[in-house]
């Protein structure tokens, strides 16, 4: 994994989508131990609620210190006409990343990255500190997945969206997966080749924990780092399946030891084996080691 462009010592086991038009859900999400809480402006928010949901995201990010997990926002797609307004709300201090749904090609990634550049400058956020996770949800997206993953240094992972992919293909969902097997297998291969991670699609049946475990296990065999989830009850089963590998654990130990020593001497960042690491990497590495030990 030495060539991976993104942070090698981090946890991406669970990406929990939380409807951002529901303050009660947002408040509950603050104490959940998902690796990423993703405040959703897309599928779970009706059109009439988009504006109020954006305001709730701004308010949530104003209380960023109350969240245990990293905080991302899923905006609406590039083609939706709502992306710019979504990004204005989402690109606030404290946000860790943006999930971009229904990405079809690299030109979308380039255009969105430029918008994010501008908003980072406007809000005095460190340059390129807000990550991007393009979601692959169409035939074009699957075909172009490697180029999508390679286009921007912001990109930390690709997300696979099975149900929109099947809709685009005009196919029905079945649990044996033959209808989406090729696409599901290709996304982590392209992500790996581009030096980023891949996060698997959701398991819709909230009460079917056995099905979730089976599906997540298949995801690990395909090379996924973690799974998109839609309910807090899915966090722990998914965490038991997506376990950091030996190389990731060893890298986390190196980060904690090297940067811990440097921070004790007043340094905020150092170079470790050719990679710049800072306080964000230290926090992620510590979390990974705590997850493995606990």
Image: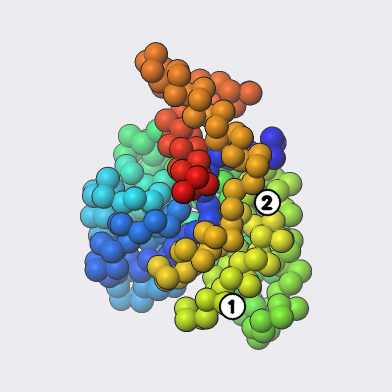
Callout 1: SS: helix
Q: Which residue is drawn at 67% across and 84% down?
A: 174
Q: In terms of image quadrants, where is residue 203? A: bottom right
Q: Which residue is identified by label 2?
A: 191
- For the residues labelled 2 and 1, the Cα–Cα distance comes to 25 Å
Which circle marks residue 211 in the picture?
1
189 or 293, which lies in front? 293
Q: In terms of image quadrants, where is residue 122? A: top left
**Is residue 156 visible in the rendered structure shown here?**
yes
Of the two numbered discs 2 and 1 on the same chain, state the one appearing first in sequence. 2
257 or 95, which lies in front? 257
Callout 2: SS: helix
* Residue extending furthest toward the top: 265
Q: In terms of image quadrants, where is residue 231? A: bottom left
Q: Residue at x 33, y 34 (%)?
A: 124
Q: Where is residue 261 in the image (x, y as percent from the top left)?
A: 45, 19
Q: Determine contact: label 2, label 1, CB under 8 Å.
A: no
The number of numbered discs placed on residues in the rendered structure image is: 2
Looking at the image, residue 251 lies above or below residue 257: below
Q: How crowded is mark 1: few (under 14 residues within 10 Å), some or many (20 or more)?
A: some
Residue 67 placement, left or right of 43: left
161 or 269, which lies in front? 269
Which circle marks residue 195 in the picture?
none
Q: Where is residue 282 in the image (x, y as percent from the top left)?
A: 46, 32
């Amino acid at each position: 994994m030495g060539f991976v462009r993104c942070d090698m010592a981090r946890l991406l086991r669970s990406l929990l989508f939380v409807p951002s038009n529901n303050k009660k859900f947002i408040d509950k999400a603050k104490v959940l131990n998902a690796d990423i809480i993703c405040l959703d402006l897309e599928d779970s928010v009706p059109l009439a609620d988009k504006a109020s949901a954006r305001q709730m995201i701004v308010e949530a990010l104003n209380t960023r210190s109350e969240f245990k997990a990293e905080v991302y926002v899923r905006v609406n797609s590039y083609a939706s006409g709502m992306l710019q307004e979504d990004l204005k709300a989402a690109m606030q201090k404290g946000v860790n990343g943006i999930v971009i749904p229904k990405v079809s090609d690299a030109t979308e990634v380039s255009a969105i990255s430029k918008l994010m550049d501008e908003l980072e400058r406007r809000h005095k956020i460190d340059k390129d500190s807000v990550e991007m996770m393009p979601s692959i949800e169409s035939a074009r997206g699957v075909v172009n997945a490697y180029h999508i993953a390679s286009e921007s240094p912001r990109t930390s992972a690709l997300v696979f969206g099975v149900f929109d992919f099947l809709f685009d293909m005009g196919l029905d969902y079945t649990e044996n997966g033959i209808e989406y097997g090729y696409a599901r297998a290709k996304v982590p291969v392209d992500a790996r080749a581009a030096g980023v991670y891949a996060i698997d699609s959701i398991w819709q049946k909230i009460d079917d924990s056995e099905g979730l475990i089976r599906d997540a296990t298949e995801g690990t065999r395909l090379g996924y780092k973690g799974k998109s989830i839609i309910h807090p009850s899915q966090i722990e089963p998914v965490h038991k399946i997506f376990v950091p590998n030996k190389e990731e654990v060893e890298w986390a130990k190196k980060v904690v030891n090297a940067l811990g020593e440097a921070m004790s001497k007043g340094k905020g960042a150092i170079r470790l084996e050719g990679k710049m690491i800072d306080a964000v990497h230290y926090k992620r590495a510590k979390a990974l080691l705590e997850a493995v030990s606990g």
